[in-house]
């Protein structure tokens, strides 16, 4: 599969601006960060995102190590429930970066994240993996669901405080329905 175009979702109010650059700039801004910090080298194709934080703060370049070069693994930028945070996803590797202090970030454990969804009423950013779903809220990590699938979670709807979906069960070799409470991540 080939790569897909980067997604941009700015549903949540935010106090920053961001632009995914077509290539690494020849002259780097004074402030430049590579995520994750321990990355020895970042491969070609890793997203280069120029971020302008809230008024008065200096712009910085965020280079996000690429997870997978596969259309199933998203790349893009999402606003977050906290107005100063930006979510950058690079080939399924998700980074939540504090734009007011870019050295503070969280790399999500799902590798890869296969889909990012917004639950605006609950102020959650939802990350769908192969086996489970993780929710990021105003306080950071809100919850992580129990295992929902042996291989492949499909979200069918997010509304009315619940998330509905399908997960494949290996023993029965069929997809089974699940419903999650968006406040707790528990199955109902």
Image (cartoon, rainbow, N blue to C red):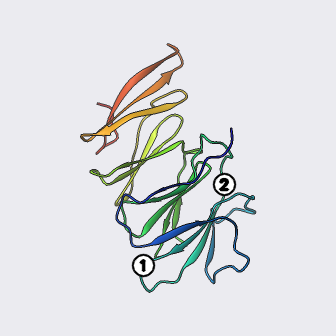
Lower position in the chain sequence, tag 1 or tag 2:
1
Quadrant where the C terminus is found in the figure: top left
The answer to whether residue 164 is left or right of residue 68 is: left
Percent coordinates x, y for residue 134 in the rendering? 44, 45
Residue 17 horizontal side relative to residue 89, left or right: left
Question: Which residue is located at x 42 percent, y 21 percent?
Answer: 176
Coordinates of residue 79 in the picture (x, y in percent): 42, 61
Between 186 and 117, which is closer to the camera in this rendering? 117
| Residue at 28% from the left image edge and 45% from the top image edge | 183
Identify the residue under disc 2.
66
Q: Quadrant of the N terminus?
A: top right
Q: Which mark is residue 141?
A: none
Instruction: Please tell me how crowded label 2 is: few (under 14), some (14-19), or many (20+) other residues with Cα within 10 Å.
Output: many
- Say if 60 sits above or below 170 in the image: below
Q: Position of residue 172 (x, y in %)?
A: 50, 13
Q: Quadrant of residue 34?
A: bottom right
Quickly name the residue at label 1. Answer: 54
Seen in the picture, residue 153 relative to 43 is either above or below; the reply is above
> Which is more toward the observer, 5 or 144?
5
* Numbered disc 1: secondary structure: loop
The CA span between labels 1 and 2 is: 26 Å
- Between residues 143 and 19, which one lies in front from this camera angle? 19
């Amino acid at each position: 599969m080939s790569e897909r175009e980067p997604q941009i979702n700015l549903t949540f109010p935010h106090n920053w601006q961001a632009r995914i650059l077509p290539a690494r700039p020849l002259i780097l801004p004074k402030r430049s960060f590579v995520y994750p910090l321990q990355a020895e080298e970042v491969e070609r194709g890793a997203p280069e995102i120029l971020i302008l934080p809230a008024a008065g703060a200096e712009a910085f370049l965020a280079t996000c190590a690429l997870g997978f070069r596969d259309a199933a693994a998203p790349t893009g930028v999402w606003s977050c429930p906290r107005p100063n945070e930006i979510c950058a996803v690079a080939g399924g590797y998700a980074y939540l970066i504090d734009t007011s202090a870019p050295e503070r970030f969280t790399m999500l454990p799902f590798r890869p994240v296969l889909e990012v969804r917004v639950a605006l009423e609950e102020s959650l950013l939802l990350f769908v993996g192969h086996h489970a779903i993780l929710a990021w809220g105003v306080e950071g990590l809100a919850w992580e669901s129990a295992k929902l699938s042996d291989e492949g979670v499909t979200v069918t709807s997010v509304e009315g405080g619940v998330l509905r979906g399908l997960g494949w069960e290996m023993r029965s070799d069929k997809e089974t329905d699940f419903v999650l409470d968006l406040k707790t991540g528990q199955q109902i």
